[in-house]
Image (cartoon, rainbow, N blue to C red):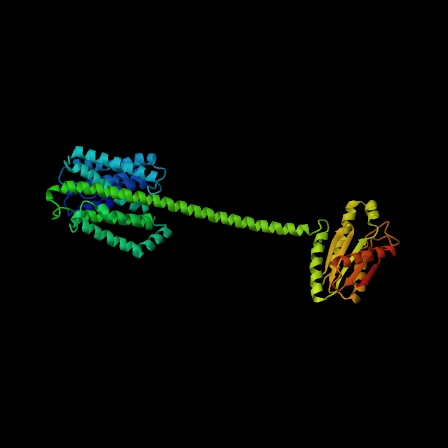
Amino acid sequence: MLNLVALVAYGVLAGFSHYLVGGQALVPGIWFPSGLMVVLALRCGPTVLPGLWLGASLIGALSSPGPLGLHAALGLASCLEPMAVLLLAPRLMRSRDPMDSLHDFAGFYSAAAIGVALSIGATGLLQPAGPYAPLSFILHLAGVLALAPFLLALPAPGDRAGLQHLGAELRRPDWWALLLAITLSTLLINGGFLPTLSLTPLALLFPLLLVAGFRFSPAAATGLNLLAALLQTWFPFIGSEALPASSDLLLRSVMGRLFCGLLVLVQMVLVTNQQHRRMRDRLEQQAHRLEEVVATRTQDLTVANARLERLSHQDSLTGIPNRRGFQRTFDAEWQRALSNQLPLTVGMLDVDHFKAYNDHYGHPAGDRCLEQIAAVLAASLGRRGELVARYGGEEFVVLLPGLSPEALGPLGERLRSSIHGLGLPHAHGGSEGLVTISLGLATAVPREGLTPEDLLAAADALLYKAKDEGRNRVCLVSLPL
């Protein structure tokens, strides 16, 4: 199937090339089958060579008289082009795409040029071409430069994204404007309307094709290159009143060289531009990935800082706020109570005979005792803003905003009895032999002249009063003292 496709495609392009020069096989024009052969060799490998050989042989037999053996040999000579690409391109190119870099571009066209030279040389040995041989080389190479980049740049049939992108480019008004400008420029050059430009096609075509290389993808840009090549062949100089008929061959040679140089320069610009685009895209992708990494790391750092902040205000043993956490909340509640003239209560409590407990039961048991006391105290406080914190050692502090003086006694008794109700044995804990607490509660409405430290000191003094009175009890007071 592949060889059948190669045979048909070769025949169509050969017939088209002959048609463009008015069916005059002896009048050389750009030979587009050369571009097809090198592309199929690069993409499909040696399996496509039989189809190309058969196509070249049949086209030769149909276009000129001669024995079949000669046409078969000429077809084999034509296949030296793809064979040279098969052998040399992998050694001269880093990738299989000539438009990937200038190195690949130079490697591919060097292999193609060597193949064209071998093919023209072998054909000349079998069938001397006379003065047309140098021009044949130029026009075969022009066929490679015109058709090969376009075929290689076309998206694969399954590449829906590439096909959609190409379709979008072909619908752009500036692409059609360039197409029209290239057509008119070629008509002016080859039609003799501007005789001074007849030998300088670069003056009009090069800027237009250069704009295409900068503005469009390789498929859309090389499509305009192919259009220019088709038009250059469509408007031959034969019979032009602007130029003497005797100089046709020389003029075609000059025009062919100029056009090949034009295509090389334009495609080099296109390759360079594509490299810059890919580099820019990679830099943008790297910048985007870097932004994502920075955002992720920033978020992780924010979470870590928040966790560190929580840990810095949390007691590692009991899990309740520590002294620093209590102080931060205490200052905030003091300011709120001062602004709204609401009562604020602070309670200081201490585990009775805790040193003796540690000495008797050991420090691990003492830690478990503090954990249980902290859990019970936290469970006993349920109103919004109420807080229990470990102040240090076996000492705890409670913060009770908005609590009226009348509720102090019942609350303090509830806290005391909740610890007593744990029933934790304490061999040196008094007559009942259980773990108990002493609690001092001080409440006040913040005002000028009264500080948070005053309220905390009052609660601490009440705690020591409870201890002095026999422990396992609550002492309270309402400020001002």
The residue most toward the front is 449
- Determine whether, in the image, residue 474 is placed left or right of residue 178: right
The number of numbered discs placed on residues in the rendered structure image is: 0
For residue 369, say whether it is visible: yes
Image quarter of the C terminus: bottom right
Residue at image point 33% right, 54% down: 169
Image quadrant in which you'd find residue 418: bottom right
For residue 26, say whether it is visible: no
The residue most toward the right is 431
Residue 473 placement (x, y as % from top left): 84, 58
- Determine whether, in the image, residue 473 is placed left or right of residue 290: right
Residue 143 placement (x, y as % from top left): 24, 43
Image quarter of the N terminus: top left
Residue at image point 22% right, 52% down: 183
Image quadrant in which you'd find residue 80: top left
The residue most toward the top is 125
Residue 422 placement (x, y as % from top left): 80, 55
